[in-house]
Image (cartoon, rainbow, N blue to C red):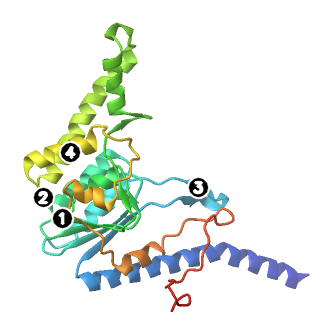
Amino acid sequence: MDIFFQLFWLFFILSALTPYFQQQALLGARARKIHELERKRQSRVITLIHRQEAVSFLGIPISRFINIDDSEQVLRAIRLTDKNVPIDLVLHTPGGLVLAAEQIAEALLRHSAKVTVFVPHYAMSGGTLIALAADEIVMDENAVLGPVDPQLGQYPAASILKVLEKKPIAEIDDQTLILADMAEKALRQVKAMVKNLLKKHMPEDKAEEVADLLSQGTWTHDYPIDAAQARALGLNVSTGMPKEVYELMELYPQPQGGKPSVQYVPLPYHKNGTPGR
């Protein structure tokens, strides 16, 4: 009976500690891959990667977005980087708090050495705002950026202003009028911010045009801007993604709450050859 009791507690302790050791091993693997990419590119590598995370042992998924903690950490990494050392930012995010994204973008814009943003899958909204501060954006051929038009609660700022065009003022409630005033200010502020980021790499009139397209509600907020369209806008976009970036992304897996919805043999396939050959 004592042996059974001891085995039970040993199993319990190992079960409790296993996730911790797995997490530490994963953090170590990420650090090694970051160092590998830094040695290859002679740069400071920073990651800003948002996945679904699990809360405590219940495994409840929550969405992660760019927040003030992110901006504090990225700004600290930039401060610790000599002004002559290039910065490579691996960016994978749905967006987030405008203030935090603007702080990161401004800090990258002020960095003297080359700033490269790598987008292996997507960098939407505030993620695109950050990418606009880079000297070069490296995208996977299937990766996307997105519009940066401000959102007020659940509504796009540009759409709120449309109400003033569609209805007489007397028929609009006070709350909507207040939202419209905030929307007008938000649109003006974001456009000015985007234009300031773009002026570093394009003429002012072109920067004005692109800032208007990206920030004034031309498209829906989740509209995908691929590499070809980003280049057509005048952004310095390439698609030569280093393999180390893909390998690094593999070390940020989505927590699995059940059976995987996507499955395949994780080997390269070539015509007239066998998997992995």
Q: Are marks 4 and 1 in contact (CB under 8 Å)?
A: no
Tag 1: amino acid = Asp
Query: Label 3 belongs to which residue?
Result: 61
Q: Are marks 3 and 4 in contact (CB under 8 Å)?
A: no
Q: Earlier in the sequence, mark 4 or mark 2?
A: 2
Query: Label 1 belongs to which residue?
Result: 135
Asked whether, in this view, residue 2 is left or right of residue 139, the answer is: right
Q: Are marks 1 and 3 in contact (CB under 8 Å)?
A: no
Query: Label 4 belongs to which residue?
Result: 211
**Looking at the image, is mark 1 or mark 3 nearer the viewer?**
1
Q: Position of residue 55 (x, y in %)?
A: 58, 57
Q: Residue at x 36, y 14 (%)?
A: 167
Q: Rounded to the nearest whole Å, what is the CA distance between mark 4 and mark 1?
A: 17 Å
Could you say which quadrant of the image residue 236 lies in? bottom left
Crowdedness near tag 3: few (<14), some (14–19) or many (≥20) residues, C-alpha within 10 Å: some
Q: Rounded to the nearest whole Å, what is the CA distance between mark 3 and mark 2?
A: 40 Å
Regarding mark 1 in the picture, which secondary structure is present there? loop
Q: Rounded to the nearest whole Å, what is the CA distance between mark 3 and mark 4?
A: 35 Å
Note whether 59 is above or below 89 in the view shown.
Answer: above
Q: Residue at x 21, y 41 (%)?
A: 212
Query: Label 2 belongs to which residue?
Result: 201
Q: Rounded to the nearest whole Å, what is the CA distance between mark 2 and mark 1?
A: 8 Å
